[in-house]
Image (spheres, grey):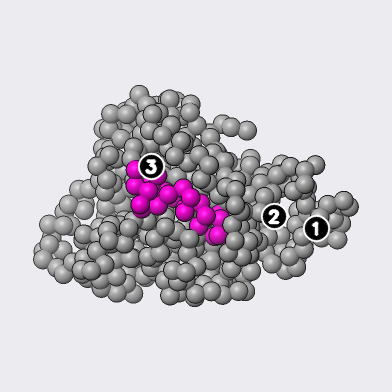
Amino acid sequence: MSGSDFVLRSRRVLLEDGPREAAVVVVDGRVATVVPHAETPSGLHVLDVDDLVVMPGVVDSHAHINEPGRTEWEGFESATRAAAAGGVTTLVEMPLNSIPATTTLAGFREKLSAAEGKCSVDVGFWGGVVPGNLEELAPLSEAGVLGFKCFLVPSGVDEFPNVTEGHLREVMPELKRLSALLIVHAELPEAIDEALKEESVAQADPRRYQTFLRSRPREAEDRAVDLLIRLARETGARVHIVHHSSADALPALRAAKAEGLALSVETCPHYLCFAAEDVPDGATEFKCCPPVRERENREQLWGALDEGLITLVVSDHSPCPPGMKALGTGNFMEAWGGISSLQLRLPVMWTLARERDYTFAHLAQWLSAAPARLVGLEGRKGAIAAGRDADLVVWDPQAEFRVEPAVLHHKHKLTPYNGQHLFGVVETTFLRGEKIYERGQFSENPAGRVLKRGAA
């Protein structure tokens, strides 16, 4: 046993079969066992948190950290500290917005070098699929990326171009051979191009949110979903649709699930929290792609989450310097599309969940277990069980706080959640049994490790 072995005891421990009074025994950075609340073993320090919730560390499989190359947008040090403050113990970083992008083995090596010694939480990496990098996929997979990301629409950065159906027909059989997951930004450019030519968009006020919303119609997602279902059926490759927002595509996704296709779907807190009718004109901090849609669309997304059609909720933390958000002009058509929320996913989702009578168990499934399963880390992350990493977050579901720049640890503090009152204050975060965050204070020594596919 090491000096950091201990027992964490609470009247609300979120286990795989639901919450109960229990004591989590941590030995050598892993959960050794879970015992009844009153039966703590002797010889170990006992940390009793009364009725605070003890939950598996949150897993965020969709975050843009942007280092190297665009570290002025975000970086490993600031992003992983914000994650720890939000109860997140595992991040999986997107392959774009850094320079170089993670589309080659050489680019992945630069990414690993940039992350070294800076991470407060464990970090895994997605590789990228772009035109012309078919020969890089096997080396990237062997080097440990957790899967591969592509865009069907221009990504917003030149070094990560989008792919077409023709590219996917080349790539998906190779990913099937590698048993690698393909995750997709599912919008097709043709529907967006058609919308941009319409008079209601082309001649409309770019400061109005409705102008931007009409420029990214549901049809762009719907057509992309239809394409991906067809290709998943033809190739047998595993496909995951990221940050889904269009309720109109849910019937097709439901049918694909019933058919047994290897296709899964995620959404984000902003699609479950905000509604297009409430976004003020000029408030470009709300801009993301796909966009926040109408209230009735939001309610259908909640229904899909409830039925298990949408299985996980991730941040899609996509920050940029405030100057790129066109704050001076409020021009939605020119502003960068991305929402900063890495630290806030747990409290935002708990605030919404409690209003809709969802439970702690739902939260643990959406935020921890399902994302861990998606990236193949379910043997280590996402649950409090013997043998798993002792990644634990202690939080107070009754405590309330106001979102303001002073409480955020992202590099840039602009977020559409500013000013909101949220329930769920993270008290303490443990990574493999080591306390990395407690009431605003961070561990001096970053304890995060790189997570690679297939590693024990």
Say above or below: 329 vs 26. Answer: below
Image position, residue 161 (x, y; %): 26, 40
- Marks 2/3: CA–CA distance: 38 Å
Say above or below: 85 vs 3. Answer: below
Q: How many labels does the image show?
A: 3
- Marks 2/1: CA–CA distance: 19 Å
Which of the 4 image quarters holds residue 394?
A: bottom right
Say above or below: 448 vs 200. Answer: above
Residue appearing at x 46%, y 36% in the figure: 112
Residue located beneath label 2 in the image? 15
Q: How crowded is mark 2: few (under 14 residues within 10 Å), some or many (20 or more)?
A: many
Q: What's under tag 3, amino acid-wise?
A: Pro
Q: Earlier in the sequence, mark 2 or mark 3?
A: 2
- Can I make out residue 238 in this image? no
Image position, residue 343 (x, y; %): 50, 60
Q: What element carries label 3?
A: loop
Q: Earlier in the sequence, mark 2 or mark 1?
A: 2
Residue located beneath label 3 in the image? 68
Image position, residue 263 (x, y; %): 44, 43
Q: What's under tag 2, amino acid-wise?
A: Leu
The nearer-to-camera label among 2 and 3 is 3
Residue located beneath label 1 in the image? 46
Q: What's under tag 1, amino acid-wise?
A: Val
Q: What stretch is highlighted in magenta?
A: 61-88
